[in-house]
Amino acid sequence: MKLFTHHEFDHHEQVVFCHDKASGLKAIIAIHNTHRGPALGGCRMYPYASDAEALTDVLRLSRGMTYKSAIANLPLGGGKSVIIGDPRHDKTPALIRAMGQAVERLGGRYIVAEDSGTGVANMQLIGEVTPHVSGIAEKFDAEGNPRSGDPSPMTARGTFVGIRAAVRHRLGREGLEGVRVAIQGVGNVGHHLAQQLHDAGARLWVCDINRAAVQRLVDELGASAVANEAIYDQEVDVFAPCALGAILNDQTIPRLRACIVAGSANNQLAEKQHGLALMKRGILYAPDYVINAGGVIDVCYERSAGDQELIVQKVDAIGDTLEEIFDRAERQRQPTDAVADRLAEERFA
Ligand code: NAD
């Protein structure tokens, strides 16, 4: 297994392999860059087929966090951690506490938060052994109702303002009344997003491998249910991927009928070249790590005891950042993802 010559290494500052015999913890913490501040990033638990697969994942995700925090102008660097194991069978309180101790040993260079396979309850347990954890504070929504440390409502809000910015830029329309949006995946983020789009007057087409989640939106919002494979072919204005990565690829891009792609999913482009492929088809792409930064903004300001108003203001600024990227991309005739990367690099250099 390569490390310094690994194709995803990209000048990581620190990579830590963590093991605890008693609990069976096997984890990797990757710290990509701390120029802007401590490296914040989620802890993913997944039954990786090999150590090499886990390493590739953590390096790629941690680098992505540097770009995401920098473009969102947060005082944070980029890092990520992975626990090798099946969250359904292998996750025990002892293992989670051992992970917290591994984070504690880094003395605050890495701040852990939830990711797939871990949740708020796990972060609360980690909070018993280290202060370097986020996504656990008691919070209140815009109506003053308590909400958990779950960042997905803010991710959905950021995605919503991002879609509004893209529609303004590409279609020259203020507001979303009558705008047609196809959402792939209506889980935590997709469901909140659907609600906000509906409230703004958009028309919705939705798919999910979880049929009950789709049915709920059909019943509650009058959304149209679409078969999973058919989501790319919908005659809509916006395609909003909110489920999986790598869904923008050689097979799907030629099928898209939307003129905007703007959704919360991470790593939407299967390969770098697909940003250019979208541009060539005249499809405006809202780079994933820019539009889906609402969650990390939420988690960041939770740590500095930011109030709800400040968080909302910072999340809504995602719309301004996207407009800057869209304008630059148009002027420079460059794909939006390449322009976003350069803007982020300017901010963390
Ligand atoms: P989630 O697991 O709650 O929702 C994902 C949904 O996608 C699920 O309902 C799942 O059934 C569905 N799905 C999976 N495979 C599918 C397929 N092939 N076709 C259609 N639907 C499918 O996750 P989430 O928290 O809502 O996150 C959604 C996306 O946004 C993920 O890519 C995540 O990495 C990204 N993201 C989330 C946050 C956050 O705050 N939750 C922040 C940044 C990025």
Image (cartoon, rainbow, N blue to C red):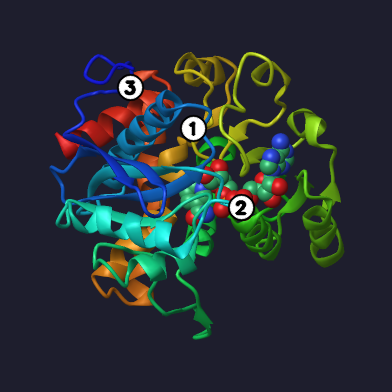
- Tell me the SS state at disc 1: loop
Q: Position of residue 123 (x, y in %)?
A: 40, 64
Q: Which is in the foreground here, disc 3 or disc 2?
A: 2
Q: CA distance from mark 2 to mark 1?
A: 25 Å
Position of 230 with respect to 328 (left or right) is right
Q: Residue 8, labelled with which disc?
A: 3
Residue underneath mark 2: 88
Q: Which is in the foreground here, disc 1 or disc 3?
A: 3
Vertical position of residue 127 compared to residue 209: above or below? below
Label 1 near ligand 1 (CB < 8 Å): yes
Vertical position of residue 205 compared to residue 201: above or below? above
Residue 95 visible in the picture: yes
Vertical position of residue 220 compared to residue 214: above or below? below
Vertical position of residue 3 compared to residue 201: above or below? above
Q: Which residue is rendered at x = 39% and y = 26% of the image?
A: 56
Q: Amino acid at mark 3?
A: Glu
- Tell me the SS state at disc 3: loop
User: Count the marks: how many?
Assistant: 3
Neighbor class of circle 1 (other Cα within 10 Å; few <14, some 14-19, many 20+) is some
Q: Amino acid at mark 2?
A: Arg
Residue 184 visible in the picture: no
Q: Which residue is rendered at x = 78% and y = 49% of the image?
A: 210
Q: Position of residue 200 (x, y in %)?
A: 65, 62
Q: Which residue is rendered at x = 85% and y = 57% of the image?
A: 215
Q: Residue furthest bottom?
A: 144
Image quarter where the N terminus lies is: top left
Q: Residue 267, labelled with which disc?
A: 1
**Residue 316 lies in quadrant:** bottom left
